[in-house]
Image: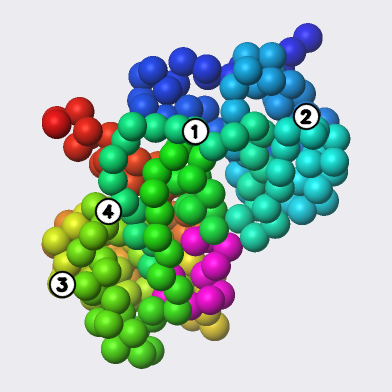
Amino acid sequence: MNMHHIDFEREDRQGFPEFIYGEGKTREQVADILDLFRRKKRSCLVTRLQPEKGEFLAGQFADCSYDPISRSLLLGRNHETDMAGLVAIIAAGSSDRPVVAEAAAVLAFLGIETRIFSDKGVAGLHRIIGTLPELEEADVVIVVAGFEGALPSVLSGIVKQPIIGVPTSVGYGVAAGGTAALHAMLSSCASGLTVVNIDNGFGAAIAASRILNLGRKKR
């Protein structure tokens, strides 16, 4: 009996396909799900998949590839899309790289152009100031930051694009696994800052795609 019920109609309703959350699933469960996608001749992206499971499945499926940084497994190819737009992903520090990589993998799967700016945290504010001319080309900006989580507030106060803040679990002591960064972003006085949950690069990428999709419909 097949216990997996894949929502293959999600893309028609929402503009993005079904993704699979891999962390709590066994490799056998993920393999069964991948078989369902293959039978439908659909690509699939599995997120939050541990390396031991990802590497095993990539070895079992010739049309799969696994990225240990983003912890994502791709079955088939990334999508081609007519969705115009550029998403900039800004990382406060190199320790935020896994969350940045997850967001980038999701956007790539959706066929959305992405540009990554690394190590632009407020500890060296000149670094982000020097990036502002390049950010003018972006339609949406995802800002990933741990510790005190100040960077999204800074950017939200000086650029016109929608800003999506992603607090990360990076930081010492009272950073409390990202809780301090989350609270700081939610308490921001920079108007219109959108915030997703701790380490949720996936959620930020989907939010960005929804913004771009709405703009496409209006055109």
For the residues labelled 1 and 3, the Cα–Cα distance comes to 33 Å
- Towards the viewer: 143 or 105: 105
Residue 164's spot in the image, x, y percent? 31, 56
Q: Quadrant of residue 13?
A: top left
Residue 74's spot in the image, x, y percent? 64, 39
Indicate the quadrant containing the N terminus: top left, top right, bottom left or bottom right: top right
Sequence-wise, the earlier of marks 2 and 4 is: 2
Of helix, strand and loop, which one carries label 2? helix
Q: Quadrant of residue 148?
A: bottom left
- Residue type highlighted by circle 2: Ala
Q: Which residues are magenta?
A: 91-100
Q: Residue at image x 61%, y 44%?
A: 47
Give the image's coloring scheme.
Answer: rainbow
- Residue type highlighted by circle 1: His
For the residues labelled 2 and 3, the Cα–Cα distance comes to 46 Å
Identity of the residue furthest to the top in this view? 1
* Main secondary structure found in the magenta portion: helix
Foreground: disc 2 or disc 4: 4
For the residues labelled 2 and 4, the Cα–Cα distance comes to 34 Å
Indicate the quadrant containing the C terminus: top left, top right, bottom left or bottom right: top left
- Residue type highlighted by circle 4: Val
Q: Is residue 102 left or right of residue 211?
A: right
Q: Which residue is mark 3?
A: 158
